[in-house]
Image (cartoon, grey):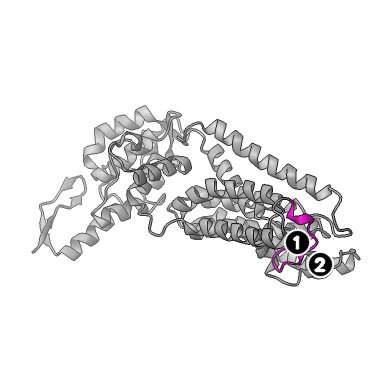
Amino acid sequence: MEKSSPRMTGGTREAPVNISPAVAANAEGEEIEVLESADVLPIAPEEVFDPENSGFISTERFRDLLATHGSELDPHKLEVLLALADGNSDGKICYQDFVNLMSNKRSNSFRRAILQGSRQLKGCSLRDEDGLGLSQRLVRHVAYETLPREVDRKWYFDSYTYCPPPWLILAITIAEVAVFMYYGIQLDRLVLQVSSPSFLKSPLPYHPQLRAQAWRYFSYIFMHTGIEHLSLNMAMQLLVGVPLEMVHGALRIGLVYVCGVLAGSLAVSVTDMTAPVVGSSGGVYALVSAHLANVVMNWSGMKCQFKLFRMAMALVCMSVEFGRAVWLRFYPPAFPPCPNPSFVAHLGGVAVGLTLGVVVLQNYEQRLQEQSLFWIFFCVYTLFVLCAVFWNIFAYSLLDVRIPPAP
């Protein structure tokens, strides 16, 4: 069985020729990569799109061009262009965004959707979809919570299958609760467990005297000073981390989380050299700060409900938790000379979230290794880790720091 496929040559369409299904599929993929016709709503004449050379084109002008030339475009490509116009509430579209979209540099998701042949982006707004089940409404809600562009929200809604589920953040949270309950029973207290003489004897917390035990730079996240500490961290971790993992996947969110955790403990070892560290605030603050920064940077595109109020509440929760940590750090310790746990891990997590985390969240369906900004921030982060390692090896003895004895 052979398939006929018309070709574009110059400005005219040739007669159909018989080709094999494999060749037809390959040709279809190539047409998705680059529009074949020089007359089809082209990338080339920028003066047509942007006569004032401002770098932007009004959505009205954009729609006029689509109405004039849209019939010559692949219908799926036309839908993406219309979604691009719908997703810009400020009334203008960046010309470079249009160029990237037409050359498929923005995302591979649309090309995959067409080549799969079984899924197509929906023509109407995602909010107008009726008759959705509970799981579909949840996916739509997550899409509007985390993604600033309608085209990305549509692709995510059509492609998400709950397989795999958002297991990473849930697994970390369950482990934190299990460890807390174990030590709550062992120490016979749930509030301010840090005041127990056996609290820091666990193999999990970071302690400056035991900094050679490398796992403690990560395992400290499973210990918390009390139920008030665990509750705030767990609430932010679940409310922000689970939707982000559903959209961006466990690998990317795990990268941001783990980098925040490591940055938190290393920041403490460099700036608060005598203090121990407990709690998952480094990883949590990396995720939350990255998400909040992404919302602010794409404010007009974010369509989540009550976003200003919810953002204010997130900042209040972060401030309350950080204030609690600062108060506890300078509160007289129960067992001097060892001070109470440090608060600097929070700041290390925020630094990771505002740099590495923002790049990860802004590049939905794009390969991070193709983003130069990702490599810049990743190299800076790696340099920080190396400097902190050397600091831990040499600085304590060179500065003659009086480290409290091991618990």
Residue 361 drawn above or below residue 199: above
Residue 335 image offset from top left, x and y in percent: 86, 58
Query: Quick one: label 2, few (<14), some, or many (20+) residues within 10 Å?
Result: some
The image shows a total of numbered marks equal to 2
Residue 115 screen position, x and y as percent: 26, 56
Q: Count residues near mark 1 (Cα–Cα under 10 Å), then give few for <14, some for 14-19, many for 20+.
A: many
Three-letter residue code for mark 1:
Phe
Q: Confirm whether the magenta stretch covers residue 203.
A: yes
In 3D space, how far apart are the residues under numbered discs 1 and 2 (Cα atoms)? 9 Å
Eyeballing the image, is 112 above or below 298?
below
Q: Is residue 65 above or below residue 225?
A: above
Question: Mark 1 near mark 2, Cβ–Cβ under 8 Å?
Answer: yes
The residue beneath circle 1 is 199
Under tag 1, what secondary structure? helix
Query: Which quadrant would residue 320 be assigned to in this image?
Result: top right
Numbered range of the magenta stretch: 192-206
Looking at the picture, tell me which residue is in the foreground, 232 or 398.
232
The numbered mark, 1 or 2, whose residue comes first in the sequence reads: 1
Residue under the point 71% across and 59% down: 265
Q: Position of residue 345 (x, y in %)?
A: 71, 54
User: Could you tell me if residue 341 is visible in this image?
Assistant: no
> Left or right of 180: which side holds 402?
right
Which one is nearer the viewer's eye here, 171 or 265?
A: 171
SS of the residue at dot 2?
loop
Quadrant where the N terminus sits is bottom left
Q: Nearer the viewer, residue 159 or 171?
A: 171
* Quadrant position of the C terminus in the picture: bottom right
Residue 330 drawn in magenta: no
Mark 2 lies on residue: 407
